[in-house]
Image (cartoon, rainbow, N blue to C red):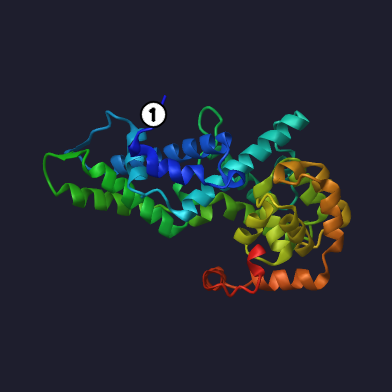
Amino acid sequence: MRHAGRDRLATVRRDFFLNPDERLTEQERALMTAMLHTLVGDVADELRASLPAGTTVANDDGDSELVAELSSAGLLDHPQLIELLLRRADEEQIASAVKARSGRREARLLQSLVSDESAAISAAAMALILARGRRRDRFGQPRVELDDLPQDCAVALANAVCAALRSRLTVTSGQSADRYLADASVVLLTRHDSSRRLEELAADLVRLLDEGGRLDDDLLAAAADEGEMTLVGQAFARRAGIDAASAADLLHSGEGARLMLLLRMADVTREFAARLLAGPGDLLGVADAGREIARFDSIKPEDVDRAREWLRLDPGYREALAALGRDHGQRAF
């Protein structure tokens, strides 16, 4: 039991007035926490492995203490990192729920693409399957890798973990502890490769399917029915002609209006929209499928064009306009 001491008051006040609809669920929190602990632990292990002989790193308290120390200092509160953890947690919950409903565990769509007559599509599908396998721990739980982070975020995390290891590092000979840690960070970041991101591998497969005239509603429906939301998001982005981050934001917004707008921008048929709503629609936050299909029908072509034009602008420019209050009502996109 935690008591009502004044030391907790500042945190309790922030927590008490948070919007209940936007707070993390217990499952989201658990998934995100586990992935964060694994990521920090992996980075710390790689840094330790790069240290030369003559150095020792105390690890009696485990990597959980590293996470606690970095969290307290605000060094893990990086928007891109938290966004990735939240999206992966959402995708994991959707995939698990879809599999539980269908009773199928295997990814039939990707497996079929591995056997595709196109060597390029087959290789891309296999690369995606292997990458997803690496993002499971020995208990089958989801994890993220440093490669999944944008370069600037990866650099920030590596430096933060180095700083946390500094007080645990003992040097018996050679250079200073700071120099050893800096060199280890360089070695780690030299191996960082954004092309190995799960989203990039999914985008490669989607591109090849599109170039082959295969990115149709049937394939999208098959992906959605299997809870392949990373693939679905990339496919919607390509068909809508917008960036993948914007498509993922609309797909996982939990708002029917934004999801329907994304479907219209991706130029899917009404039949596909109805199938999506009847299938994983509730997992995407749709409470009333009938109302949302009516919304899909009512969206005007000029509204679709206006939304697409807005989302094709540079994200930094859009954020600056929003900060200045000059987004002309486009913030809902």
Q: 83 or 98: nearer the eye?
A: 83
Is the residue 129 above or below the residue 216 in the image?
above
Residue 138 x %, y %: 51, 28
User: Dot 1, crowdedness within 10 Å: few (<14), some or many (≥20)?
Assistant: few
In terms of image quadrants, where is residue 214? bottom right
Q: Which residue is mark 1?
A: 3
Left or right side of 216 for 148: left
| Viewer can see residue 208 | no
Residue at (59% x, 43% y) in the render = 20
Residue at (66% x, 59% y) in the render = 247
Q: Amino acid at mark 1?
A: His
Is the residue 28 above or below the residue 198 in the image?
above
Residue 232 x %, y %: 70, 51
Left or right side of 14 for 167: left
Counting the numbered discs, the total is 1
Residue at (64% x, 37% y) in the render = 93
Is the residue 31 above or below the residue 323 in the image?
above
Left or right side of 251 for 17: left
Residue 106 x %, y %: 70, 33
Determine the secondary structure under disc 1: loop
Q: 155 or 118: nearer the eye?
A: 155
